[in-house]
Image (cartoon, grey):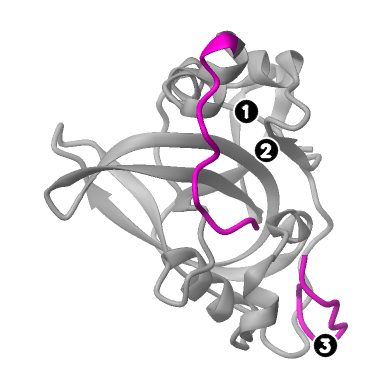
Amino acid sequence: MINATSDGKTFDPVPAGTYVARCYQMIHIGTIEQEFMGEKKEMNKVRISWELPTETKIFKQELGEEPYTVSKDFTLSMHEKANLRKFLESWRGKGFNEEEAKCFDITKLLGKPCMLSVIHKTSKAGKIYAEISSASTLPRGMACPEQINDNFEFTYEPFSQKKFDSLPDWLKDKIKSSREYREIAEPSHREAEPDVSELSGADDDSLPF
């Protein structure tokens, strides 16, 4: 339910701007060590991707035109100050109450449309890349084109070796560094579950999710 399309080759990022988009891919990276405010901390990360159906290009001749895709990594937390919660509240155009935030199933995002603002940044190596700066609901009366990529979800429960193998090498390496992957690779060294918020809230047909 998440479509991995990168073969490791580089290509020009989508131009900066605001686009109609649809969420199609979700990858649970797992609990990895990262530096946060000068300290090394373990963070449970998820990578969410969107296709931009109005922006297409031939990346591989044999596949023809495909939509540009953009992705963003989040810490898997619905704490009131967490970036994921702020991003989702902007997307749905409404805040979460505490009951909803206690257990929000983020896979509900798959297939949902939104507007994404994309900016360009320059890496330390001098490479220009696209970064999602914000999300919002579609303007009233605007429709999102039909989805092009299949939904794709990678999770540890259940773990799918086939899905894992389909991911680009750089992402597989990141996943391999996680606590959850190590527990699968070496089950005798299973560690305690991290204390993080699980990401299913009440349905509301007036909201995108």
Mark 1 vs 2: CB contact within 8 A: yes
Question: Measured along the vertical axis of the image, is residue 159 above or below residue 113?
Answer: above
Residue 21 lies in the magenta stretch: no
Query: Pointer 2: residues within 10 angstroms few (<14), some, or many (20+)?
Result: some
The tag on residue 66 is 2
Mark 2 vs 3: CB contact within 8 A: no
- Residue 85 horizontal/vertical position (percent): 52, 71
Q: Secondary structure at mark 3?
A: loop
- Marks 2 and 3, Cα distance to the nearest angstrom? 31 Å
| Image quadrant where one finds the N terminus | top right
Q: Is 78 placed left or right of 53 in the picture?
A: left
Q: Secondary structure at mark 1?
A: loop
- Residue 209 horizontal/vertical position (percent): 76, 72
Question: Who's the residue at 71% across and 28% down the image?
Answer: 64
The tag on residue 125 is none
The tag on residue 206 is 3
Q: Amino acid at mark 1?
A: Thr
Main secondary structure along the magenta-highlighted residues: loop
- Residue 16 horizontal/vertical position (percent): 39, 60
Q: Which residues are magenta?
A: 188-209
- Marks 1 and 2, Cα distance to the nearest angstrom? 10 Å
Query: Pointer 1: residues within 10 angstroms few (<14), some, or many (20+)?
Result: few
Q: Amino acid at mark 3?
A: Ser
Does residue 174 appear in this view? yes
The tag on residue 5 is 1
Q: Nearer the viewer, residue 106 or 151?
A: 106
- Marks 1 and 3, Cα distance to the nearest angstrom? 32 Å
Q: Nearer the viewer, residue 101 or 125?
A: 101
Q: Secondary structure at mark 2?
A: strand
Query: Pointer 3: residues within 10 angstroms few (<14), some, or many (20+)?
Result: few
Q: Is 132 placed left or right of 197 in the picture?
A: left
- Residue 41 horizontal/vertical position (percent): 28, 43
